[in-house]
Amino acid sequence: MTRDPHSDPKRPTLSRRTFLAGAGGVAASGALGAHLEAAGAEGAQPEPAILRGTVEITLTVNGRARTLQVEPRTTLLSALRDRLELCGTKSVCERGNCGACTVLLDGEPANACLTLAVSAVGRAVTTVEGLGDEGGLSVVQEELCTHDGLMCGFCTPGFAMSLTAVLARDPEASLDRIREGCAGNLCRCGTYPHVFQAGLEAARRLRGGR
Amino acid sequence: MADLPDPPQSAATRVVGARPVRPDGAAKADGSAAYVDDLAIEGLWHGATLRSERPRARFAVDTSALAGSGVVCLTAADVPGRNRIALIADDWPVLADGETNHVGEALALVAAPSRAAAFAALGELRVTYEDLPAEVDLDAALAGSARELAACAVDHGDVEAGLSAAAHVVEATYETAHQEHAYIEPQGMIALPGPDSAVEVVGSLQCPYYVHHALVSLLGCEPDAVRVRQAVTGGGFGGKEDYPDLIAAHAVLLAARAGRPVKLVYDRREDMLATTRRHPSRVRHRTGVDAEGKLVAVDIDVLLDGGAYTTLSPVVLSRAVLHAAGPYACPNVRIRGRVLATHTATNGAFRGFGAPQTQFAAERQMDRVARVLGLDPLAIRERNAYRPGDVTPTGQVLDESASALQCLAEAERRTGFRARWQALEAERSRALDDGRPRAGIGLSLCWHGVGFTGNGERRMESPVAVRLERGGRLAVLAASTDIGQGTETVLAQIAAEAAGVPFEAVEVAPPDTALVPDSGPTVASRTVMVVGGILERAAGELARRVREGAPGLPFAAAGDAWLAEHGPLEVVERYADDGTEFDEETYRGVAYAVHGWGADVVEASVDPDTLIARTERATLVCDVGKVIHPLLCAGQVEGGSLQAFGWGHLEAARVTGGRLEQGSFSTYTIPTTLDAPAMETVLLEHPGGSGPRGAKGVGEIPMDGGAPALAAAIENAVGIAATRIPATPEVLFEAREAGDDDG
Ligand code: FES
Ligand code: FES
């Protein structure tokens, strides 16, 4: 662990975006990697009895069938984040207040924190990771960037989902329609005006008005 | 790495003032940005915190049920050294030791292989309390023997003589309540123990070197043994300035005992219960004016509720006091400020840092004085607002960038405030009892000192470094964090502009204490002006050396030639002392290098029966010196104003028995898309100070003016003076019943 970036051959690349990309980013930092492996090899402690008892389900997430073990009480939010490693869907309030966990179920917006994973079986689940394609971001996501409809970004996946749902339902969506469609999404940074602009511009583009 | 073309040297390619898409945007939009709770780390355990249920009590924790379970459990006895977080006063325990001073205080910690197991383990702990008398609000603190956490005073001229010579003396008291930061990402931290007792933490934080300092002091180790890294951070607003010191200490102690990485991530209820909030305030004004409405004397008492421990209260008070007289010239000023301890969660840094509280009082008082004199709110402000060359209560002479009058003029030009206010006043006096919502319009004028108060910047002498990379690229090395406000983007713009390279050629290093120098905390609206100003010099100097080394070559080729010939090139610049002075004992001298200025006009509607207020339109005029990025800058103004509106009328925070009643977003209601008014942001440029091209910072001033302008609009609509915020229907009803209205 050195203070001199020049003498550390493994120092992370100079990017605020990639340096923490999951386990690789942290484990690669100096001598810590070896320690982490050793710790992992000891194996986990047994969980209390109340937490045992799981069922196997198959969810269709972003077009892919994913089979996983969940408890009956596991929320869709937990299944996505903790089991499927889809961490774009955020956990903020876990009681339906904030919309940061918004996903689409058969195209309709839903709070993943209030949805049981087992109840999503047989429905098409779309998360923020599934909005774009190989070409990159979806139109809604692009416009959120262009209009700076994101600051800290923690609410952004939820807004991207809500906007996508609004525009799918109403390609002519007005400002008021967009405002209502995002009324369940909280943003403390105050991006609302920029999100509205992004929504209106995305609607225009999706209607073919480039 | 591809060579980048040299930019044509025309004004059209200027980077400052352009609107490049923020480089961190795409990862936030597609969900791949890695916040602390998104990091997958092998062998990670999960921590949980046992919290006090009592505002003040002796307590004992029985941990015997966990014996032999494998779960790690720590109490105060396990904290090394003095069991204190190293901050200003050293009174903030890492874990409460035998006596708790607020509901939600950490009494013990556990760590287990899963989050569920950690919470199950918490349930096994038994706490016994022996209650002690508690002072849970300012009334109780004043009546009891509360600790004074800080005090300061400003004296200018002869206040008593001024008051006795005044044509009118107007006296009133104003109050503001707690405000919860409500950053959407809750607090979170991961500690990873390294070899030889070294430790690394990564988390959601604003000030990596604050955390670094606290951990080095806690562990009594060499600075190199602690590494602090910021994960992508989901909002801070000051809430991740002081509190991360504590949560990092907890995570580090758990990780050391467990011998493996441990994560602590709060849930919403816990975050609201236990972490810092905005200081509640009670501010009394005695204002003397002459017959024309010129201020002749102001006498102000500022009282803040500090919560249980000192944390940053002395600095918050200092800023509160220095802004308490508002942006108005007055020959005789006396301001007394005190922070009293209460047995509630510690209050700490929050956007504006005390200035919003005292400027709420100052602005409402100006409206009250205007009413006494029969003036409109614009007239009294025009008459008294600071001009360049005016002297503040500390004796500071204001520079040419003091733009209060321009802000007022622009606000009037955009809104026709005066005529509209007068029309609505007249309408109210003949309003029918028809139950229809009443319209109101309100105005505020504010100032905000940029950077640290007094000698703070001089003391720190912050360094910022720029390093030449291959292909003409530059790396910016600074500890300033991006918590959403766009630090990474604007620092890259400033460096690119100063060096004459394209925006894309600049990368801003991640805030990691192993990589970047301590360029100071990301607070006090100082990032653009102070850090940006130093960066501008460093980048300019680096580019000068490279270009001089190989005249005529494109920058990329010249850079590569330099690296080949001389090896690495890194230019470090430090804060340059501007030669001014501030006496921290007498509060005389230059309190702030420069000020931002702003005027807000808010149009509201109020239901006369339910007294529910809505903000309909807001015109936000803000002098930021120089706009670095128009979109990001407007976002700061809008976002700060929305928080001010929420504080002004929506965010009810009631503390009962020392416990905040609101523990979720369904009871603590922050503005939604439906509450946000239509906002028109007007950015003025009156450059001043040492910032890049005269940029003066924009992070906090938007928090100052929104609440008083909204309260004024409510008064204009329904005639209730709104001296207390949040002006919820209940608060307005009580004010009306108490007869505090002007019909
Ligand atoms: S986390 Fe689901 S609505 Fe907040
Ligand atoms: S961008 Fe920070 S909460 Fe919305």
Image (cartoon, helix red, strand yellow):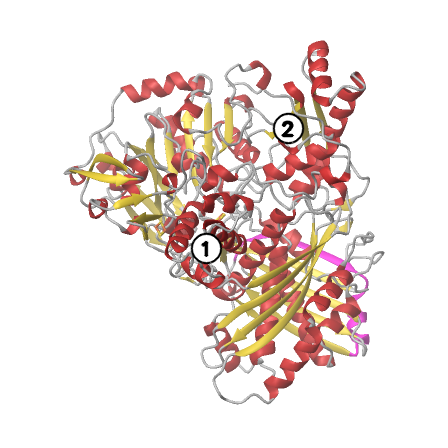
Q: Residue at x 61, y 66 (%)?
A: B708
Query: Is A129 within the magenta?
Result: no
Q: Residue at x 56, y 27 (%)?
A: B513
Query: Is B163 within the magenta?
Result: yes
The residue that disc 1 covers is B343
Label 1's element?
loop
Q: Is residue B406 above or below residue B203?
A: below
Type of the residue with mark 2: Ala
Q: Earlier in the sequence, mark 1 or mark 2?
A: 1
Q: Residue at x 53, y 23 (%)?
A: A13
Q: Mark 1 — on which chain does it sit?
A: B
How many numbered dots are placed on residues in this image?
2
Disc assigned to residue A71: none
Please name whichever residue, B432 or B299, is drawn nearer the observer in this view of the structure.
B432
The residue that disc 2 covers is B505
Q: Is residue B100 above or below residue A176?
A: above
Q: Quadrant of the N terminus of chain B?
A: top right
